[in-house]
Image (tube, grey):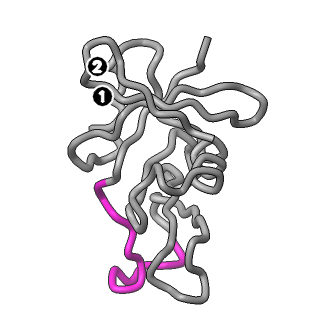
């Protein structure tokens, strides 16, 4: 379960969750959506311990603690998809058949889906940073 605490400066909320037998500290959400390149640069500016979560870390946290994420918003991960992009996840609340389920998609260019009206991959993502807890 995620536990919210406030950092000493009062500006960073933190949460811990066990994922794959390790404790993770989740930073607060970035105030703006970002492209993958912007997210990587922002992550590096936050300090060497902070990073984007892996696809499995994010998906596990979304399943275990859905109230800690904005539903239907796409969150970027650090896991490369092999198509020149990264995996991202979101919690579905729109489709009644799949309400509350976590979906993970590739942000890379899928050569089988060339029609932009079909390929609705976002260019900007929500960002939550994570670091290994001590």
Image marks 1 and 2: residues in contact by CB distance under 8 Å: yes
Q: Position of residue 123 (x, y in %)?
A: 30, 59
Mark drawn on residue 123: none
* Mark 1 element type: helix
Q: Position of residue 104 (x, y in %)?
A: 58, 62
- How many circles with numbers are drawn on the protein? 2
Residue for badge 1: 41
Identify the image quadrant of residue 116: bottom left
| Residue at (44, 21) in percent of width and height | 50
Q: Is residue 111 left or right of residue 8?
A: right
Give the position of the N terminus as an image quadrant. top right
| 117 lies above or below 44 | below
Seen as rendered, the residue at the extreme right is 21
Say whether residue 113 is magenta. Answer: yes
Tell which tag, 1 or 2, sits nearer the viewer.
2
Q: Residues within 10 Å of mark 2 (few under 14, many from 20)?
A: few
| Residue at (60, 81) in percent of width and height | 98
* Mark 2 element type: helix
Q: Which of the pair 53/3 is nearer the observer?
A: 3
Q: Which of the pair 120/84 is nearer the observer?
A: 120
Q: Is residue 13 left or right of residue 98?
A: left
Give the position of the C terminus as an image quadrant. top right
Q: Is residue 81 left or right of residue 108?
A: right
Identify the image quadrant of residue 38: top left
- Report the magenta stretch's main SS: loop
Say whether residue 119 is magenta. Answer: yes
Q: CA distance from mark 1 to mark 2?
A: 6 Å
Give the extent of the magenta segment.
111-124
Q: Residues within 10 Å of mark 1 (few under 14, many from 20)?
A: few
Residue for badge 2: 45
Q: Which of the pair 71/107 is nearer the observer?
A: 71
| 72 lies above or below 133 | below
């Amino acid at each position: 379960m995620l536990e919210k605490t406030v950092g000493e400066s009062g500006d960073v909320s933190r949460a811990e969750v066990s994922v794959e037998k390790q404790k993770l500290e989740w930073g607060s959400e970035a105030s703006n959506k970002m492209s993958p390149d912007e997210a990587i640069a922002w992550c590096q500016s936050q300090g060497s311990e902070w990073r984007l979560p892996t696809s499995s870390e994010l998906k596990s946290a979304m399943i275990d603690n859905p109230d800690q994420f904005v539903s239907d918003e796409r969150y970027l991960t650090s896991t490369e998809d092999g198509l020149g992009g990264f995996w991202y996840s979101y919690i579905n609340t729109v489709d009644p058949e799949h309400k509350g389920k976590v979906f993970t998609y590739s942000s890379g260019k899928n050569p089988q889906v060339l029609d932009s009206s079909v390929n609705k991959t976002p260019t900007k993502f929500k960002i939550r940073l994570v670091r290994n807890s001590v």
